[in-house]
Amino acid sequence: MKVNGLSKRRPTMYFLMWILLALSGCGGGGATSSTKPNSPSLPTEPQPNEPAQCVNQLYSISAISDNGNASEGFDAQKAIDGDTSSISRWSSTGLNSQLIIDVGSIKTIGSLTIKWFQGAEKVAYFSVDGSSDSESWTSLVANTQSSGRHSGFELIEMPDDTRARYIRLNAMGNNKDQQNDIVEVQVHQCKEATGQFNAVFPNEVGIELDDWYLSVPTDEDNSGTADSILETQLADGYTNSEYFYASNDNGIVMRSSSYGFKTSANTSYVRVELREMLRRGNRAIKTQGVNLNNWVFGSAPESSRNSAGGVDGDLTVKLAINHVTTSGEDYQVGRVVIGQIHANDDEPVRLYYRKLPGNDKGSVYFAHESREKDANGKNIESYIELIGSRSNSVANPQDGIALNEVFSYHINVTMNLLSVTVSREGKPDVVAQFDMSESLYNQADQYHYFKVGLYHLNNSSDPDDYVQGTFYQIKNSHNGYVASE
């Protein structure tokens, strides 16, 4: 049994299949069907009408039940309702809790995918049985456990040639208590279920994650805002098959839905984004302020330079954008921020990628937000186009960047000079500079941090639209900053 299988299918296909399942409303009632097949045992030979090569299918679940000890408000049906928010889950207490799944008829069962509640914080103990008639059971996976690193779906492979109508999940608590919590369970025809189930974890692809925490649009801590995955969790191998996982080509995939929990009440947009944390897991250091967690401009007062974690900043990111939104308001469709410098309240730089529907290639440009105010009291913003245009109706940009095309960006701040560079193999670099001397970021109280990922600036798209990118290099540095081990 493998907890992490290697998917050979495109990552986005799993998400699309999951959406289709949720929209179709399949899942059935809360009791096991009374209709039984003729055979009382688990057939092991493929039926003549089945294809020799497995073509993966996410099975509809016609019914689901438990053995009667579900917590109030957390019944079995919630484990197949298509809602992957943590509040919609099956919950039960005890070392002999059972969840029984009926797929309607005897089928080839290749794997299960399970989203455990707080799956990146707890190790769940369980076993899996199969049956043709819900009376005679065969052990499929005995006395195993979840990884404790998956916040999304985790893959559990079944033995070869498994055929069953009923799947019984025997939940036996976790490494912290006797609680059993499953947000969602799915049954697949093939072992390598279509999805984001690379055997490699994000911390194993060569990108150092100790300097970052991650925002994802879930709310497992019931705070009402997006979950923050701390530096230590990322360094230990946190993964989420819906939002943050290792790709098959040795990168980190980030995918952001258009809707979900946000980082605060003051933002309008969802994000899956890394926030630079120079404290590297030392929670005695506050996240905000001119302190060892953040950096300042080299033009800042000496007292600020002495108090900060670093001076000036340099960020290099190598990535490919795999998908952008194709629906929504004209000014929002197809756009995403892929890198930032954030200050106390403002943004010295937001770097955009944008591809409009109908265009084969996308544009890259950045915005500089000055702390200086205009006549209406608003921050003065400047936009600089690097490749193509930020227009809402531009034709296919000459020499633009296509989806899945690998490119790099480099953001550098030295004193008050901002430099942004876009690089592609075999093509000349595109460079722009901006003088920030009048932008007021060199004042004593101003601190800064890099952000990398997908700040998804589209909250008007269709519900199933999304943006996705794969990141192959993330490297940050600062004068005077030495990463502690």
Image: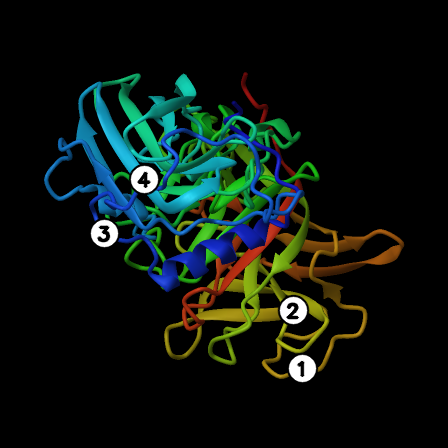
Which mark sits nearer the N-terminus, 1 or 2? 2
Name, please, the residue furthest toward the front. 38
Separation (CA) of disc 2 from disc 4:
55 Å
Q: Amino acid at mark 1?
A: Val
Residue at which label 4 appears:
101
**Residue marked by disc 1:** 394
Is residue 413 in view from this perspective? yes
Q: Residue at x 13, y 33 (%)?
A: 68
Which secondary structure, mark 4? strand
Viewed as shown, does residue 273 lie left or right of 217?
right
Discs 1/4, front: 4
Disc 2 designates what residue?
384
- Going from N to C along the chain, the mark reached first, 3 or 2, is 3
Q: Nearer the viewer, residue 119 or 76?
A: 76
Mark 3, residue position: 29
* Image spot of residue 430 (x, y percent): 78, 60
